[in-house]
């Protein structure tokens, strides 16, 4: 562990979505090892309880809490938020890690396209519902896991849900660009509150990513590529850095890869597009539209 990540997180509370495996679980072990109380989320109670037990064992910190919710459903995100608010009188870090890739179009319980709903609308809604708690806990941090795929994305306002045309890659790229735009707009809205918002690319990491609904040829390809990928611990490094390090204190409205600020898709710097995405997202999750 280097000096930046050796920060003490004792007394801090961190919520990490999608932390039963992969990058989220590795981030949970790291932040728990620094002394944080860590809440993890997953869809399945048994899997989440097992993950919590192994995180506690590996970190030597028993303060690991389990929250169960299928975050593709807005009702479940709302229930999750109310359980988190009841459990945590303060919240220092929200790590929006949940996300994935689906080769085929799936509809959620709300009738929305699954990739957009889980990768973008779930963190948008959860963050909005937890924002007052983050503000009263300031200095606090919202860290969102995007992907280098954001650079190939575009926000298709005429077909956000891929009703007319769906490709898993296109939906993924769009959702990951949405993570970046969400963060930039959030950072503006949070100016002066002591709550920061950053977004990151973890690097290509060997996890269960894309396993649920694989694109044709994906399995053998990934099998060959795995040995060149980052380990989950390595993939979690930038998340952990942004969530905990003193060096990242006060950083806001920026995108990182390998703990270094990087430029993002040109459209992400277009204030009219980010504001429009915010407005459409608020409508889709039934939140009041507040103009900035
Ligand atoms: N791996 C990479 O190379 C890579 C590259 C760039 C960006 N990323 C991003 O990194 C993040 C983490 O990915 P990963 O590679 O660690 O993926 P992963 O191994 O597939 O882990 C995904 C996590 O999300 C949870 N999850 C999935 N669907 C869910 C749902 N509907 N509701 C609640 N939880 C759900 C899973 O928990 P359960 O299955 O237990 O519910 C699991 O804990 C994602 O945002 C991904 O886009 C990954």
Image (cartoon, rainbow, N blue to C red):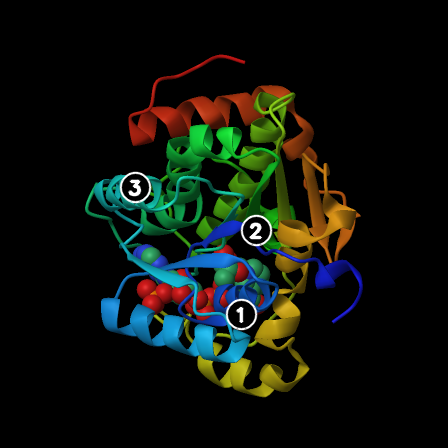
Q: Mark 1 or mark 3: name the one nearer the start of the chain.
A: 1
| Residue depicted at 46% across the width and 58% down the height | 38
Quarter of the figure with the C terminus: top right
Of 134 and 199, the residue lying toward us: 134
Q: Which residue is mark 3?
A: 86
Give the secondary structure at mark 1. Answer: helix
Left or right of 215 in this view: 139? right
Give the secondary structure at mark 3. Answer: helix
Q: Which residue is mark 2?
A: 146
Left or right of 31 in this view: 56? left
Residue 94 appears at what percent x and percent y? 50, 46
| Residue depicted at 40% across the width and 30% down the height | 281
* Vertical position of residue 228 compared to residue 33: above or below: below
Residue 251 appears at what percent x and percent y? 73, 38
Of 194 and 209, the residue lying toward us: 194
The extreme front residue here reads 11
Q: Nearer the viewer, mark 1 or mark 2?
A: 1
Q: Mark 1 or mark 2: name the one nearer the start of the chain.
A: 1
* Vertical position of residue 217 compared to residue 24: above or below: below
Residue 50 appears at what percent x and percent y? 33, 76
Tell me the quarter of the picture where residue 116 sits: top left
Q: Cα distance, mark 1 to mark 2?
A: 20 Å
């Amino acid at each position: 562990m280097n000096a930046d990540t050796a920060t003490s997180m004792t007394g801090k509370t961190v919520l990490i979505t999608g932390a039963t495996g992969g990058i989220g679980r590795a981030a949970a072990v790291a932040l728990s090892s620094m002394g944080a109380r860590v809440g993890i989320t997953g869809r399945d109670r048994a899997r989440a309880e097992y993950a919590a037990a192994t995180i506690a064992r590996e970190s030597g910190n028993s303060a690991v809490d389990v929250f169960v919710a299928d975050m593709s459903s807005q009702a479940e995100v709302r229930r999750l938020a109310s359980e988190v608010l009841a459990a945590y009188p303060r919240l220092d870090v929200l790590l929006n890690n949940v996300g994935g890739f689906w080769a085929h179009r799936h509809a959620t319980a709300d009738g929305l396209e699954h990739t957009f709903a889980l990768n973008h609308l779930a963190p948008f809604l959860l963050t909005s519902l937890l924002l007052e708690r983050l503000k009263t806990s300031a200095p606090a941090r919202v860290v969102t896991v995007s992907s280098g795929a954001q650079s190939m994305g575009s926000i298709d306002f005429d077909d956000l849900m891929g009703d007319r045309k769906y490709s898993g890659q296109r939906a993924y790229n769009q959702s990951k660009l949405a993570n970046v735009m969400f963060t930039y707009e959030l950072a503006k809205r949070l100016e002066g509150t002591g709550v920061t918002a950053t977004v990151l690319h973890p690097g290509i990491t060997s996890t269960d990513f894309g396993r649920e609904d694989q694109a044709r040829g994906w399995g053998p390809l990934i099998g060959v590529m795995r040995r060149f990928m980052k380990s989950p611990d390595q993939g979690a490094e930038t998340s952990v850095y942004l969530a905990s390090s003193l060096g990242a204190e006060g950083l806001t409205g920026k995108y990182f890869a390998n703990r270094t600020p990087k430029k993002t898709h040109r459209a992400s710097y277009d204030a009219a597009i980010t504001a429009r995405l915010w407005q459409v997202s608020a409508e889709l999750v039934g939140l009041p539209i507040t103009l900035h």
